[in-house]
Image (spheres, rainbow, N blue to C red):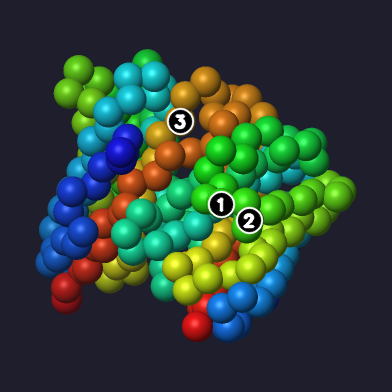
Amino acid sequence: DAGVIQSPRHEVTEMGQEVTLRCKPISGHNSLFWYRQTMMRGLELLIYFNNNVPIDDSGMPEDRFSAKMPNASFSTLKIQPSEPRDSAVYFCASSPTQTGWSSPLHFGNGTRLTVT
Amino acid sequence: DQQVKQNSPSLSVQEGRISILNCDYTNSMFDYFLWYKKYPAEGPTFLISISSIKDKNEDGRFTVFLNKSAKHLSLHIVPSQPGDSAVYFCAASSGGGADGLTFGKGTHLIIQP
């Protein structure tokens, strides 16, 4: 049973470049979340989708960040242009329910982003 | 402003003893609380949860206690095993969790042989 799949696992890029992170949620899950983990702030919710529709993007730090979910099996998080302070581990998570906690969030293994 | 706080960045416990991880929250609207466990280079995995209508939930070696009046919860692991060495995140939600989870910064638990 495949879990949440994220790619790439590691990304190293230079300041100013565009970065695209990818996520494939668990089949049948209708909610998808993007989180960022840093030492200073821990795990922060950036944006989440329900049935492919963005519900709340108030956690997105700046306009340089954007996320899309063109279909139920794929989502992207894009940073353009990237900056050194964007360096972090980015996690994607999915859940089968919008309300209720019959099943909690399932996380992918994350993408470690380093911007030099 | 951190709504979920884990004030101990790390905790060292001897194998076989009890590990107690603590978590405090400030948002009185939170009605569901979870603990996640994270190994290096992996994503967090769900461990145990508790609804605000309960004050205790037990699953094998893991027990979560909730004190709503103090806005405090704790995770007890007994007996502690080497495989329990990981980072533990406390998380909370309101309104059924549709808006995602709010996480603490985590506590790194080290089980010593």
Depth check, front residue: A14 or B22: A14
Other residues around mark 3 within 10 Å, as few (<14) / some (14–19) / many (≥20) = many
Place of residue B75 in the rendered image (x, y in percent of width and height, measured from the top left): 26, 43
Q: Is residue B91 left or right of residue B42?
A: left
Q: Is residue A85 above or below residue A71?
A: below
> Mark 3 or 1, which is nearer the eye?
1
Depth check, front residue: B17 or B8: B8
- Same chain for marks 3 and 1? no
Residue A23 visible in this rendered orientation of the protein: no
Residues at marks 3 and 1, CA–CA distance in whole angstroms:
24 Å
Depth check, front residue: A94 or B50: A94
Place of residue A57 in the rendered image (x, y in percent of width and height, measured from the top left): 62, 40
Q: Quadrant of the C terminus of chain B?
A: bottom left
Quarter location, residue A54: top right
- Amino acid carrying label 1: it is Glu
Q: From the image, tell me which residue sits under label 1.
A: A62
Residues at marks 2 and 3, CA–CA distance in whole angstroms:
24 Å
Q: Chain of mark 3?
A: B
Q: Chain of mark 1?
A: A
The total of numbered circles placed on residues is 3
CB within 8 Å, label 1 to label 2: yes
Q: Chain of mark 2?
A: A
Place of residue A29 in the rendered image (x, y in percent of width and height, measured from the top left): 74, 43
- Amino acid carrying label 3: it is Ser
Q: From the image, tell me which residue sits under label 3.
A: B93
Other residues around mark 2 within 10 Å, as few (<14) / some (14–19) / many (≥20) = some
Residue A91 visible in this rendered orientation of the protein: yes
Q: From the image, tell me which residue sits under label 2.
A: A65
- Amino acid carrying label 2: it is Phe
Q: Is residue B40 left or right of residue A19?
A: left
